[in-house]
Each structure stands twice: as C-alpha cells, then as structure tokens.
Image (spheres, helix red, strand yellow):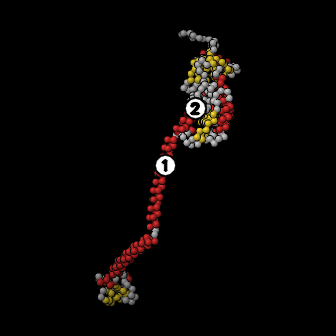
Amino acid sequence: MQPTLFSDSSALSVSQLVRQIKDVVEADEILNDVWVRGEVSNFSQAASRHVYFTLKDRDAQIKCVMWRDDAARVLRLPENGEAIEAHGRVSMYETRGDVQLYVDEIKLAGAGALWQEFENLRARLDAEGLFDAARKRALPQFPKIIGVVTSRQGAVLRDICRVLARRYPLAQVLLAPTLVQGAGAAEMVANQIQRINKFDIDVLIVARGGGSIEDLWAFNAEIVARAIYDSRVPVISAVGHETDFTIADFVADVRAPTPSVAAELVAPEARELRASVRAAQIRIAQIARERIGDARVNLARQIYALRRNSPRARVENDRQRVDELSRRLAASIASSLELRREELNGATRQLSALNPDATLARGYAIVREKKSGRVVKKKSQVARRTEIRVRVSDGEFEAETRA
C-alpha cells in the first residue's frame, strides 16, 4: 500500500489559498477605492464590449478589467502607450490567481485632460435633462428660411449653399457669421445662435469643419450648449467629421456627421418633391375616377328606382296584378265548383246505394208487426200467430207466423 504523498491536514488547497488572499485584498478599504496612475498596454475590447488592458510603470504592472456598462460611460477609451489614471477596486481572478484592478472610471492625462473636462460637462448637462430624447424636435418638412451659424470663410458655408441650391433652391439661407475656434469663439457662437433666433427662420444649422479636439473646443462650451437648448427652432449640429463628437451634438435636435449632410437633412430634394407631387396627382386622379364611377352607379340606381316607383309604372303593375288576380279567382271558382260537383255526385251515389227500394229490388223484404208497426229484425221478436206486414219491391201483404 502506497503512503499518501501529503498527509499534513493543515495544508491549504490552492483554491483555499487564493480565496484567502482574495478575502484579505477585498477587506482592505484602500484597495476597494483606489486611483492608480500608469501607462496602458495590451488593450483589447471583447465582443461582449468588456475592456481588458494592463496598467504599468517602470517597475510593475497590473491587469485591469472594465465592464461594458462602465466602458460605455467613457467617451473615448485609452490607447496603448497612453498615460491614464484609473479608479476602481482590487480583487482576484480565482481561476488564474491573478490580482486585477476592476476599473469603473478613467481620467486621461495630458491631452486627455480636455476629454475629462468634456466628460464632466456632459455628465452634468445630461443630469439636467439637456440631452433628453423626449425634447428633441422634428425638422420642418418644407423650411422657407434656413439659418446657418458658421464661419463666413472656408468650405463649410459653400458646401451647405451648394447642396441647398441643388436640392431645394426655394429655400432662403440666412447666415449669422461667427468665429469657430480660438479665443472668444464659444461666446460668439452662443451670441449668434441667440441673435438669429430673433429672425423668422424655420430651422438652424450650427456647423464647422473638422479639426483636433482643441479646434472643436468652442462647441464643447456650456454657453453654446445652453444657447442650442434655448433655441426657438430645431437645431442641427454639424461640427467636425463623422468620428467627431461635441457637446453641441448631444444637445441639438439632430446630429449630422458633416455640414453637407446637414444641408441634405434639412432640405428635401427637388426631384423627390416632383416625384411626390406626381404620385399625389396620380392618387388624386384615381380617387376622382373611383368617386365618379361610384356616383354614376348610384345615379343609375336612383333612376331605376324612380322609374320603378313612378305613377305610370305603379298603375301598370297594379293593372297587371288585377288581371292576374282575376285569372286566379276564375280558376279558383271553377276548381271549387268542380270539387263541389264531384262531392254531390258522390253523395248521390251513396244515397242511391242506401235507398230501401233499391234494397227491396234486390230480393230483400221489410217485416213489421201489424199491431205495433215495429220492424222485425230477429226471429225472437215475434211470437206464434203474430200478424205481420211484409213489404217487398212491388207492394205489401199481410201474413201470420206459425212458429
């Protein structure tokens, strides 16, 4: 019999040891609410949208996990080589025995500080309800005057006007020129949004071309966000390129990836309008034909009913009905007379068959007591020497019984 390799019952299993370490780590208050600064490496995001990366410095590293709900709150996730500050709690992944930082918040260092400021403002305005979908307004279908807040110079204004001229030349463009970057740009953009709202515009485009986060920063200003929120008419935000997002995009009623797309969204294409008008004309003509056809059928029914119910038609119908009833009455009388004649003949035949004279003619006789005149039906009704009267077919005679 082989001896047991480990016989000391005080030894811990690997699972017990890892669980003990995990309990100690999770019981530490500092490790449950800690900020860690380091450089990102091995960054990846799984199909589940959970994020995995390593945070390291010159002397050490720690594996990090960020669940998808926490990652969704970050406007921009870090990249490999980027310095960040990560907040979370330290625990262990028991299966591999790895100590891990479970991250719930990220601060970007350096240029990431602007992103942090962006996220802080976005969270505050969102909490105030400035981004609520319920307050978003639909764009007018056929705007007459389209307001534009953008730079007078550059390709943005030309692109918007070119698209509008091609798609919807009926619309008038009202420009409120403004700085779109640099010192004082945010204040000027907000002032021009407020100013153009005093005119009789139907919709407003706030636009600028692409650029770095610093170039677009005026459209991340709180003063611009509140000016868009207070706009009397629906606002389309068209700031930067498709991959750029600003606070203005979240507050606006509609976000367009580029200024050209904003112009397409706000203006129906003339060809589409003509096609819609043509389709409407065809539909109206079809409805008119259907209604005219229905009216003709109804008129024909009314004419038929009028002819049918006219006095002449009623007299003719009544006359024909009188003739028909007369024929039916005559036929009924003739049939009734024939029936009565047959019944009379039958009764006559029956009476003839029951006539006593006819019976006597066939050889029968009627016997009566002479004294009482009673008809004798049985032998027992008469006694010996009873005088009787006998009637035969040709007369009567008297007789006397012997027995």
The count of marks equals 2
Q: Position of residue 303 (x, y in %)?
A: 45, 64
SS class, disc 2: helix
Rendering quarter of residue 218? top right
Towards the viewer: 165 or 223: 165
Towards the viewer: 168 or 99: 168
Q: Quadrant of the C terminus?
A: bottom left
- Can residue 137 be seen here? The reply is no
Callout 2: few (<14), some (14-19), or many (20+) C-alpha neighbours within 10 Å?
many
Q: Which residue is mark 2?
A: 156
Residue drawn where x is 60% and y is 15% of the image: 14
Amino acid type, residue under disc 2 in the picture: Val
Which numbered disc, 1 or 2, marks the residue closer to the eye?
A: 2
Residue drawn where x is 57% and y is 10% of the image: 5
Amino acid type, residue under disc 1 in the picture: Gln
Towards the viewer: 396 or 146: 146
Say which label, 1 or 2, has the lower sequence index: 2
Residue drawn where x is 60% and y is 11% of the image: 7
Q: Is residue 293 above or below residue 89?
A: below
Rendering quarter of residue 223? top right
Q: Of the numbered discs in the image, which one, if any, rests on residue 281?
A: 1
Give the spatial CA distance, label 1 vs label 2: 38 Å
Q: Position of residue 381 (x, y in %)?
A: 38, 83
